Each structure stands twice: as structure tokens, then as C-alpha cells.
Image: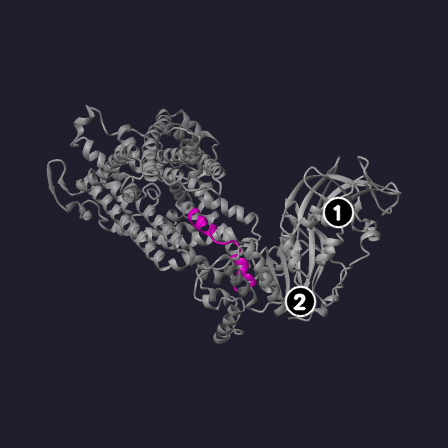
Amino acid sequence: MPDGGTAIALPPAARGRPVVRTLAPDQRLMRWTLVLAGVALLLVLAAPMAMLLVRAFQDAEGAWVGIANFTVYVTTPSLAVSAWRSVWTAAVATLLVVPLAFVYAYGLTRSRMPARGAFRAVMLVPVLAPSLLPALALITLFGNQGLLKAWLFGGTIYGPAGIIAAQVFACFPHAALILSVALATSDARLYEAAEVLRAGRIRTFLTVTLPGSIYGLVSAAVVVFTMVVTDFGIPKVIGGSFNVLATDVYKQVVGQQNFNMGAVVGIVLLIPALVAFALERWATRRKAATMSGRAVAYVPKARLWRDVPLLLACTVIAGLLLAVVGTALWSSLITFWPWNLNLTLNNYDFARFDTAGWGSVWTSVKMAAAAALVGTPVIFIIAWLVARTPEAGALRGVVGFLVTAPLAIPGLVLGLAYILFFNHPANPLNILYGTLAILALNSVVHFWTVGHLTATTALRQLDPEFEAASASLKVPVWTTFGRVTVPMCLPAVLEMSAYIFVNAMTTVSAVIFLYGPDFKPAAVAAVQMDEAGQSSAAAAMACVILGVALTVKIAQVAVSAVIDRTTQGWRRR
Amino acid sequence: MALIAETTLVQGAAPPIVGAPYLLVDHVSKRFGAFTALRDVSLSVVAAELICFLGPSGCGKTTLLRAIAGLDPASEGRITQGGRDITGLPPSARDFGIVFQSYALFPNLSIAANVGYGLRGALWPKTRRQDRVIELLALVGLAEQAQKYPAQLSGGQQQRVALARALAPEPGLLLLDEPLSALDAQVRQHLRQEIRALQRRLGVTTIMVTHDQEEAMAIADRIVVMHAGRIEQVGTPEAVYRHPASAFVAGFVGRSSHFDAVVQAEGLRTADGHLIPSPPPAPIGTSVKVFVRPEDVRLTATTAGPLSAEVTALEYLGPVCRLALADGRLLLEAEASPDALREIGAQPGARIGLSIPPSRMLIFPGDA
């Protein structure tokens, strides 16, 4: 211990003396890495979006034209009609999905029906498929040469009916996930209070269950609405001549090479997403306020009159989900639809339909793997820096905003912003254009927010004083990051990487503008094969994508289970 | 506070603190944005003493601890430890060990690995590190638990692991941030004595933050009472209890009843006319605030004296009973043994006599 006697000789003027703070090397590293992260995010997110905004106010030659493009947009009847169509199809799809998902989620969380685990697994299948898969399946059944075309009584599946039906399939798991979380986190004490106060089942449902899940319902509705408005794959495949906003962007940019009008439509497409983003944050905040830390989890008791109807409803819904996947799989095995129904693997010989052949599958796998392998550590480290950098102040706010923003940007819009920015001749980064790297980068940025939220949730469960404790023990912060933080968050890290991989694998809208001739992703190849009338091959490609995504997801679940078992010594009491 | 000096500082003066100052807090302020958490705080901590920061939540006690640790460095002023200016240094450049309220043990590391976490580098070769871990685990009585994980231990055991981890690198200063607040009352009492014994044995200068005055009284050499970002008083437990430096300290530390009065020639006159006999503690006509400890209210069976009151409530606490007394608007709390109360017939509804020795009244300037 140092000798205390030397402490007396102090210069006098300590009062009011401002303190000059010095940071330790590890703290400095954290701070500068956070600065670097902020700059990088400005470059790969803010700059492209700014470029999109600027181009909407310019003509093709780059001259400033004010709101002229927007005036043209509003006065072009076909474009305004598409906007309206996007809105009403999304509204109808939302009205269909949310009640179905509510019933399903209610069955999963509030009943004792059997096989709830299997129902939960089936619910997630649509997440693993590209969105055009249900559209292809519907065409097989109800298309011009569909088996069940007669069921439509002369109507057509190409157009709003097909779009809405396919969107219900594609959006169902997202709504059901949100609602099952909302229903699972209800407070058992409220139900006990209602029972003690002699409220009947229906009154309890109306006064406790519904109000308790109202924010979950709002979240589910806005998420579904936004997904439908911004999805590109489904209207492209099954929309026929029924144009919507998403197909308009594509037509303006790819068809007419009118980037300025494309930017205008992109900004219009951004509006519902931004409104949904704001609503969603509002609902999340309100939900957090209604849930006290002392809530007791609700455990349902077996009750036949409730469980049997729920089991039937869930079986029908799960059956339909599987039927859609099954139809796509079956149609991918048909020799020559609808004349030769013999089964064959010929449709999987992609080289017959597309010069890239199986190459596009490998492109997608490589892109998704690169996005997951690079994106996961980067997203996790930045989430950790945002949470734990000392005295980060405004920097924390800026980076925190930048990593949350991608949630509000539809893939199509981000993709468009990327070609405008990275394809600009004056941009030194344009060497990236047309490479696999830009596809992976776009995927990482597009799916950043969900990964960030997963990481933040996991980090929030760690003691906030880990860094302080290790500093007091003179252990640099990166040692503790490696020895404690990462091992403790491993399940979340795996979940993040599987999420990025699966979404990068299945997305069409994020990459449709960006791929170069040498690197065509599988989902884009499927869209093009369908466009060329090779719908069986397109279905085969969609099934391959589903297969890869399913394999990765199962691998993640399996590895998580192993980790859980090997680390149970410290995870459980 | 000249008012008190005359009446209360006469007896039982605090023993002088001997020893060299090890830690000096010199005019330190801390602001968080517009909020000032510490206002011009000065304090000197003697080597090898155990000092407690005591105060209600939000008083700045944890802020001061974190400023000393460098976790949230001070905005102004100077802090020196062993003669070295540490005010702006990062925590890793200082010399202290800390136990957090949550313990912040690393859940995925064994108890031994947690304790040995800070024993790295050339100074701690493997065998020396292992020996030190074994020594510390034995010191806190957890030698058997070395290979377990924190979640497999009880709260009190986790607390000891945190203590062993903080002490392992032989820090010059031990900081304890509400280390016992997450534990049951019984474990808490036991552990605070263990902490005290360990601190005495190792002779490590220790600062403990607590909002529990009993805890502070029980183990501290000196108590620092804090309120609204300022230090109200620094003193031994007895000095703080018997000779509070401010009305806040009188009201916060220990139980007391209080009333407002005006100094008159024959004693203290309350607003509704009661006269408490006393030599004038201050110039005639001064408004004062008077605090009385329950054990200082003397009770008698006869109501002939200048003061009497009705017993409005009686709590039986085992060795003593606590009484609520009321006479008009004069409300007092008193304590006495059950036997004594039986003798004077103090039952709810009964009227008994009482007196307050002038030397035991804690008198402070009034609001007026």
C-alpha cells in the first residue's frame, strides 16, 4: 500500500478546477471503433439514401427540377392507380392475416392442445421460402392451366386475388410470431383477479386478453401492411397486368431506365414503411409500459371446449401452409405442366433454363454466407459498442439511429439507392458495382436492425457492470468481451447469423437491381425463369432456396441445443 | 452551528481520527447534463479505516463512489489517492477493488476463474495465481466451491466471491457499493460482521455505500452522511447519532420526534403553547427545530409535572416497547422497557407524565 503521508502537499486551487479526463487504451479503442462504425454506416446507408432523395428532384441529365418529377407522378393516372392498389391489397391481406395469426398464436400460447412445438415449426416455414414460392404454387393450382381453375368460377388468380392469397401465406409467420410473443407475455395475476371477481370467459377475453394484446395486434397489422406494400416477388409473379408500387419501381428502373421516376416511386414506397416504423415503435413503447417486472407468466389449464376447436383451426391453417409448400414442390417435379404429369428431376437441371444454372444457387449461398459471417460480428460488436462505450454521448445517438433506420427502408428502395450511389461514375466505390461484395453488403445493411435488436436484447441480460468490474481488475475490455460477453451471447449470435443467412438467401427485392451478370442470385433466377414461362423450373429453384434455408435454420437450432446442453452448468441453478 | 454547540457537544465527544489521510476528495462536483449530483464535496479518508457513505437514494453517495473509482469521473475538483492525483484517470489506471450491488460476477466462469480474473501478467505467474486464489477462497470460506459457477451459489456466497475477486490483486482501496442490499436480513447481519472482520484483518482502506443506517452504524469507523449532493456530516457512528450536525442528519439517522418552538427565558415554547423547561439554548425569541430521541423521553406515572401526554399507541418489540404520545399537537415517540411501562401504567388511552432532559434535546435553527 502506498504511503499516505505524501498526500498532504496539495496545490490549493481544487475548487472549480475542471477535470481533464483521460481514457484508458481500451476505452479509446471502443470510442474510435464506434466513430469508425458511424462513418461506415453513413457511407453504406445514409449516403445512398441521400442520393436517392437527390435523384428524385433531378432530371435524367442531373439538372435540378424541383418537385416536377412528383408532379408527373401524381398526374400520371397509371402510377397513382398503382399506389391505390398497393394500399387496398395490403389492407385486405392485413385484415385476413391478423385474425388467422391471432387464432394460431392463441392456440400456441393459451391452450393445452397437443403438438404445439410442431405447429410452431410449421408456422415458421414460410419465412424460409422466397416470397414468390406461394405465388408459383397458386399459379400451379389456379393459373391459366391450373388444376383447380374451375373453383374460381371464371375469375382469375392473376391480379389482386393471387397477390392477396400469396401475401397471406408469406406474412402469416411474422404476424403469428408477434402475436404469440404478445399473448405469451400476459400477466397471470390479471386472469386470477378476473376469476376471483367472477368475470365469465367471454368477459375475461374482452377485458383482459384483447386489451393486453392490443399493441401486439397493432404491431402485427403494421408489419404485415408494410411487408405487402413493399414486397416485389409476389406481384411480379402473380400480379399479371395489375401493377402495384413495387412493380412500378422495377418497371421505371429496369424497363424504362428512368432512374429519377424510380427514385420518386421509391420515396413514395418509403412513406408507408416510415409510418409503420413510427407506429411500431409507439406500440412497443406502450407495450413495455403495460408490462410490469413483477408479472407472473400465464400457464393455461387444459379445457376441452377451448382446446379442441383451436386444435382444429390450427390444423387447418398449418395444413394450408404445408399444402402451399407441397404444391410448389410437386409442381417442381412435373415433367411438362399440365400435359405430362409424370414426375422428374429435370426441372432441377437449371442449366436447361438459365445460363447460370446451379451457379446462381452457389452465388446466393456465397452471398448469404458472406453476409452472415461478416455481418454478424460487425452488427454484434457495434451493438455492444453502442451499449457499453463510456461517455459516448451524441455518438451513441447517431450510431443508434443509423442501425435502427434499415427497418424502415424497403429492400427495393435500398437496392435502388445502392445502384444510384455505387453505380455513380464519380464514386470511387463503384468498383464494387456488379460484384458479390455489394450483394452481401446490401443484405447486411438491409437486415441490420433485426440483428441489432437481437444482439441488444441479449446484451441487456448481462450485468451492466462487467466492463467496470474488469477495468477495476485492470483487465482490458476486449479480454472480457472475448471471455465473457461473446460466450454468454452465443445463442443470440447464432440466431443473428441464421437470420441474416436465411433472409439474404430468400430476398428478391433487395438484390433485383444490384446483381451483375456474373453473380445472379437464385431468387432472381427464379423470377426470370417464371418470366420466361418456365414455371416448373422457377418452382424448383424456389424449393432449392427453401431447402438451403431450412438446412441452415435446422443447423442453427441443433447447434444452439448443443451449446445449451454443454453450458447448462452456468446457465441454470 | 453555534446553537448546538452549547447544549449538545459537551458530552461524549468523538474520538479524534488518527492516521494519515490516504484518500483526499477536494472540492469535487459532478454534473450529469443539467443535473448536479455532487456539489463541492470535500472529504479525507484515513488509511485502513472503514468509512460508510450514508444517505437516502439520490443523495449522491454512489456518484461519489463512482467518481473515486473513475467509473463516472468528477466534473470539477481533485481526488488524490496515496498522494497521486487520480481525478481524471480511467478506472484501470487506479488502484482499487470494487464489489457492485449486483456483484457483476462472470456467470460463465468458475468461482476460481472469477477470483483469479484480475491476476494476470508477469506479476502473477500461474502457480502464484493459483496460490492466491486458494488463499482468498479460504479467507472467505468458499474453498470447497472453487469449481462451481456463480449461479450455483447462494446470494451470500456470491457476495463473498465478489469480495474475494476485488481483494485478489491486493488493492490499496476497497469500494463496496451497497454490497448487502440484495440479501436477506439475517444473511446481511452476518455478512456485515464478516466484512468488518476481514477489513480489520487485511487493514485495507474501505469505502462502503449504503442506505441502511443500522448497517453503517454497526460497522463503520466513520460515517459520511450525504443529502442532495452535499456532505452533511462526517463523524463516528456515535457522533452522528448523538451530535447530528444538521436537522437533516438528526431526522435521517436514528428515530426521533421533532417539533418547532421559540426560545423563551424559561424554556422552549411550542406553537400551541407547550413549554418544555430548559435553559435558553439561544437568544430569547429565536425559532428553533427540536429533535428528541425516543429513549430520551423520560416517563413518569404522575402527571403533576409541566408535561404530560396521552398514550395513543403502543408497540411491543420484545426488549422494549415503543409508545406514541400526544398532547394536543405535541406528538412524541418514546421507548422504555415493558417492566417500566407496567409500573407507570402506560396503556393506550392512559395519561402519563413526561420530561425531556435539556441536554438531550437536539436543537437546530428553525425555518423562520
What kind of element bears circle 1? loop
At label 2, the amino acid type is Ala
> For mark 1, does the 10 Å Cα neighbourhood hold few (<14), some (14 to 19), or many (20 or more) residues?
some
Along the line of sight, which residue is nearer the eye, A48 or A171?
A171
Q: Quick check: B54 above or below B85? A: above
Residue type pointed to by label 1: Val
Q: Residues within 10 Å of mark 2 (few under 14, many from 20)?
A: many
Type of colouring: one colour
On screen, residue B333 above or below A476? above
Residue B48, label in figure = 2
Query: Where is residue A467 shown, x and y percent of the image?
Result: 52, 58
Would you name the residue on which mark 1 appears? Answer: B297
Q: Is residue A271 visible?
A: no
**Residue B365 position by quadrant:** top right
Instruction: Give the x, y percent position of residue A291.
Output: 47, 39
Visible in this render: residue A152?
Answer: yes
Q: Which residues are magenta?
A: A453-475
As drawn, is B128 to the left or to the right of A523?
A: right
Kindly identify the residue that appears in the image at 22 percent across and 49 percent down: A357
Q: Are marks 2 and 1 on the same chain?
A: yes
Q: Chain of mark 1?
A: B
Marks 2 and 1 sit apart, C-alpha to C-alpha, by 38 Å
Chain of the residue displaying label 2: B
Residue A283 on the magenta span: no
Marks 2 & 1, CB-CB < 8 Å contact: no
| Vertical placement of residue A128 versus A218, above or below | below
